[in-house]
Image (tube, helix red, strand yellow):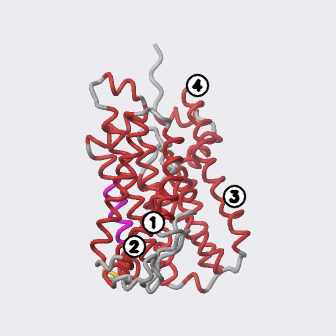
Amino acid sequence: MDAPATPTAQQAATPMSERIRDLTVRYGVIAITIFLLVFFLASEDTFRRSTTLLSVLKYASVTAIGGLGVTTAMVVGGIDLSIGGTAGMAVTISAMTMVIYDQVGWVAIGAVLVSGALVGLLNAFLIVKLRIPDMLATLSMMFVVQGLKLVFVDGQSVSSGMPLPDGSFAVGRFTPDFLAIDNGFVGPLPVPVLILILVTLAAWIFLTRTRWGRVMYAIGANPEATRLAGVSVSRYRALAYVISGLLASVAGLILSSRIGQGDISAGNSLLLDSVAVALVGMSVMGLNLPNAWGTSLGAVMLGILITGLTIAGVPYYAQDVVKGSVLVVALVFSFTLSRKKARYVSAV
């Protein structure tokens, strides 16, 4: 009887091309992020300033938190396309609460979080109870919330002193405590960066270190087997979409504080970026699974790229081409190379 192959023998038997592919799948996105950072640090003096690096992380915070919402839905085998609309509605609701109704910042924060949870519940109802495919349900909800935010304000942006339908003028304003969400610091860290770190850490712990998170991964892998094991699949799927709605509203709070007014176009571009970084994050360390740290790293990579291109003077209309090209390369690591690796391993 032949003796089992030792790890050294197995490694030697693995073709060099497969070992290179394995390293590429595991560390490709990390390598691209490091390359972009080093490239812009070496080529652009402005990029080397500490304030610029912090600005990159601040820029990435909104996309990353929105991406974490998408990631949570992906964990249970779904997708949430209402992320951008929910964040945009958060901007409008926070502005209405403070500017039109003259309330303090904490009231606006509460109203926004409640609205995000409600959108998540509506998504869950459509998907879990009515059995509408998640992509169609959340796409429809995106149009609903985008329309609602326009109806709420008669299609105009909300700002202090704006005329109201009754002939009066809005007397409220964005309060200092609310504006501190984006402009404040905790020690050397900007508040959005701290929020990003805490949300990412919380998402990682929830998804990988708790029973709820492990069950949600099991549902994403095989919902029928999980149901036969006695798990309430519907309840966990609903929870995923509520969390996604809440995270979208948190991203909207940061965005609202950043622009300082109820811009009706806010959040329109968040969906594509959030989905992109969630997909890119799947390839980090070759996991090929939605995960919190990978999503945040994908957002940081995107932030480095956009900030560097802006500093370098690349026209805005050309930035999408570069951004899309880099994202395509990163996605290759997750969906093409990883599949080839999986086929090779199964064959061995």
Cα distance, mark 4 to mark 3?
A: 32 Å
The residue under label 2 is 96
Cα distance, mark 1 to mark 3?
A: 38 Å
State yes or no: discs 1 and 2 in contact (Cβ < 8 Å): yes
Q: Which segment did they paint magenta?
A: 192-203
Q: Is residue 283 left or right of residue 103?
A: right
Q: Does the segment drawn in magenta span residue 180?
A: no
Q: Nearer the viewer, residue 9 or 104?
A: 104
Which SS class for mark 2? helix
User: Callout 1: few (<14), some (14-19), or many (20+) C-alpha neighbours within 10 Å?
Assistant: few
Cα distance, mark 1 to mark 4?
A: 58 Å
Where's the N terminus, which quadrant? top left
In the rendered structure, which disc, 1 or 3, sits on the residue that comes first in sequence?
1
Disc 1 residue type (three-letter): Phe
Magenta stretch secondary structure, dominant? helix
The residue under label 3 is 325
Mark 1 or mark 4, whichever is nearer to me: 1
Q: Give me the residue at 45% from left, 82% from top.
A: 167
State yes or no: discs 4 and 2 in contact (Cβ < 8 Å): no
Q: Nearer the viewer, residue 266 or 44?
A: 266
Q: Give me the residue at 36% from left, 39% from top.
A: 237
Residue 282 screen position, x and y as percent: 50, 48
